[in-house]
Amino acid sequence: MNQTRRTFDASFKLQVVQMIRNQGIGVSQVCRDMNLGETAVRRWVAQFDADQLGQNGIGKPVTAEQQRIRQLEGENRQLRMDNDLLKKASAFFARELR
């Protein structure tokens, strides 16, 4: 029995988390009503909580803002590494010219 893995977009995940957080519906009830895996939903809630506290958490961020922040942090990290490499290369070539 091969089951295909379902994927959910960030807006759906956020909607489920908001049902749990804002409406006070339990995780188990939401999972039964929407035919979702409890482990996945608990992970979404944990990720949302981490996002709200400004932490990385586990998995993909739930909110669009946190997704964008994570993307920009990755780009920033890559640019810093590129900058360090260029500094080392220019220092190397400056020594070669002497």
Image (cartoon, rainbow, N blue to C red):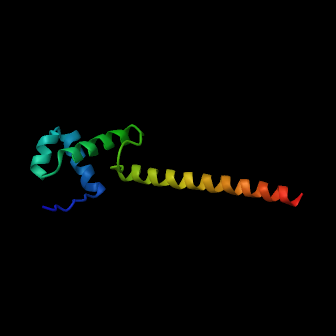
Quadrant housing residue 95:
bottom right
Q: Residue at x 40, y 52 (%)?
A: 67
Count the numbered circles shown: 0
Q: Residue at x 16, y 62 (%)?
A: 2
Location of residue 64 in the rendering, given as x and y in whole percent from the top left corner:
37, 53
Q: Residue at x 42, y 40 (%)?
A: 54
Location of residue 85 in the rendering, given as x and y in whole percent from the top left corner:
67, 55
Location of residue 52 in the rendering, given as x and y in whole percent from the top left corner:
36, 40
Q: Is 59 on the left or on the right of 33, as rendered? A: right
* Foreground pick, 38 / 30: 38
* Foreground pick, 44 / 97: 97
Q: Is 51 on the left or on the right of 39, as rendered? A: right
Quadrant including the C terminus: bottom right
* Foreground pick, 68 / 60: 60
Quadrant including the N terminus: bottom left
Location of residue 17 in the rendering, given as x and y in whole percent from the top left corner:
24, 45
Q: Residue at x 27, y 50 (%)?
A: 14
Q: Residue furthest front?
A: 1
